[in-house]
Image: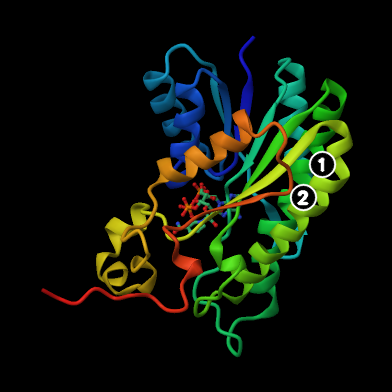
């Protein structure tokens, strides 16, 4: 019987690469996005590309407001999957609030709460629902798409960095408490990924220092998807682990900037 992965935030960018990796390996896929129309477009595209697998999209938002996680939507989603007899063997928490341009003296506290609530609290609620079912079925795996900003800060992303750091603590706590149920919990830590923002804002990306990695390049979505696939399909004895996919960016004292020719 085919296995099923659930990938959050998978209408665009890295989430698409993760969906495509699992679908091309023959897994059925459940994915989420926030917008109904965007989800329908992505679902159609996936179904046309991967004929032999079942692919279903659900529109779901993380929060009612900055302070309140929408738990009911997660319950509804899992109730719907239960009704259809779909068991999620692997949960990939890819969706994130990027928390861009957060200035300590300018942004209200609710902006901070919005990012942390989405990236930590909402993800925790998602894992709780998935893990309850994995426990009943004898096991499963959870993969967080984290960030190397959990280790090293970049400007004006305070809430994001706090959320990704907190997410690593969450990942380890879950790994410890869920190990006895044969549920493995791990994290992939990308550095910069080439997304549509790379295309829409080329001037910014020409300037960013994390281009200057020891490997001389940044990740594409498929690099992140490879790491997720390793945790989901191969890492039988690995839990609570962090796999950094950043071209070596965070091991540097400072970036080695190539001289202009
Ligand atoms: N891009 C990078 O350079 C980079 C670097 C390091 C780590 N990462 C991590 O890698 C993952 C994917 O990054 P990405 O750049 O591909 O992401 P992205 O383009 O920003 O897309 C993220 C997805 O998250 C969903 N999302 C955003 N806010 C949400 C909310 N409040 N509730 C529910 N869903 C929400 C979006 O839904 P909609 O489709 O509805 O907008 C989108 O599908 C993230 O966890 C990110 O933190 C990215």
Q: Quadrant of the C terminus?
A: bottom left
Q: Quadrant of the N terminus?
A: top right
Q: Is residue 24 visible?
A: yes
- Measured as percent of width and height from the top left, residue 86 is found at 70, 19
Q: Is 261 left, or right, of 208 in this rendering? A: left
* Image-quadrant location for residue 256: bottom left
Kindly give the residue lying farthest to the left in the view shown.
261
Disc 2 crowd rating (10 Å Cα; few below 14, some 14-19, many 20+) is some
Image disc number at residue 35: none
* Image-quadrant location for residue 96: bottom right
Q: CA distance from mark 1 to mark 2?
A: 6 Å
The answer to whether 192 is drawn above or below residue 142 in the figure is: below
Q: Secondary structure at mark 1?
A: helix
The residue lying at 70 percent from left, 58 percent from top is 168
The residue lying at 80 percent from left, 28 percent from top is 134
* Image-quadrant location for residue 110: bottom right
The residue lying at 75 percent from left, 65 percent from top is 67
Q: Is 51 left, or right, of 198 in this rendering? A: right
- Measured as percent of width and height from the top left, residue 41 is found at 42, 32
Q: Is 177 left, or right, of 48 in this rendering? A: right
Q: Secondary structure at mark 2?
A: helix
| Residue assigned mark 2 | 124
Q: Do the numbered discs 1 and 2 sit on residues whose CB atoms are within 8 Å?
A: yes
Image disc number at residue 128: 1
């Amino acid at each position: 019987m085919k296995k099923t992965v659930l990938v959050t935030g998978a209408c665009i960018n890295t989430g698409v690469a993760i969906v495509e990796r699992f679908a091309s390996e023959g897994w059925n896929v459940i994915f989420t996005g926030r917008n109904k129309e965007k989800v329908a477009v992505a679902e159609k595209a996936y179904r046309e590309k991967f004929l032999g697998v079942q692919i279903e999209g659900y529109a779901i938002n993380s929060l009612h407001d900055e302070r309140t996680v929408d738990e009911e939507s997660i319950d509804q989603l899992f109730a719907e999957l239960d009704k259809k007899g779909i068991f999620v063997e692997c949960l990939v928490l890819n969706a994130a609030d990027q928390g861009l341009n957060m200035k300590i003296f300018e942004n209200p506290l609710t902006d901070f709460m919005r990012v942390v609530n989405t990236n930590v609290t909402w993800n925790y609620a998602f894992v709780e629902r998935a893990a309850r079912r994995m426990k009943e079925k004898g096991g499963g795996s959870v993969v967080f798409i984290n960030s190397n900003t959990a280790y090293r800060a970049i400007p004006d992303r305070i809430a994001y960095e706090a959320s990704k750091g907190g997410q690593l603590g969450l990942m380890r706590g879950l790994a410890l408490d869920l190990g006895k149920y044969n549920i493995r919990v791990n994290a992939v830590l990308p550095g910069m990924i080439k997304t549509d923002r790379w295309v829409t804002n080329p001037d910014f990306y020409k300037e960013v220092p994390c281009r200057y990695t020891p490997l001389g390049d940044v990740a594409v979505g498929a690099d992140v998807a490879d790491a997720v696939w390793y945790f989901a399909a191969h890492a039988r004895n690995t839990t609570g682990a962090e796999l950094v996919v950043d071209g070596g960016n965070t091991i540097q004292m400072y970036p080695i900037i190539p001289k202009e020719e």
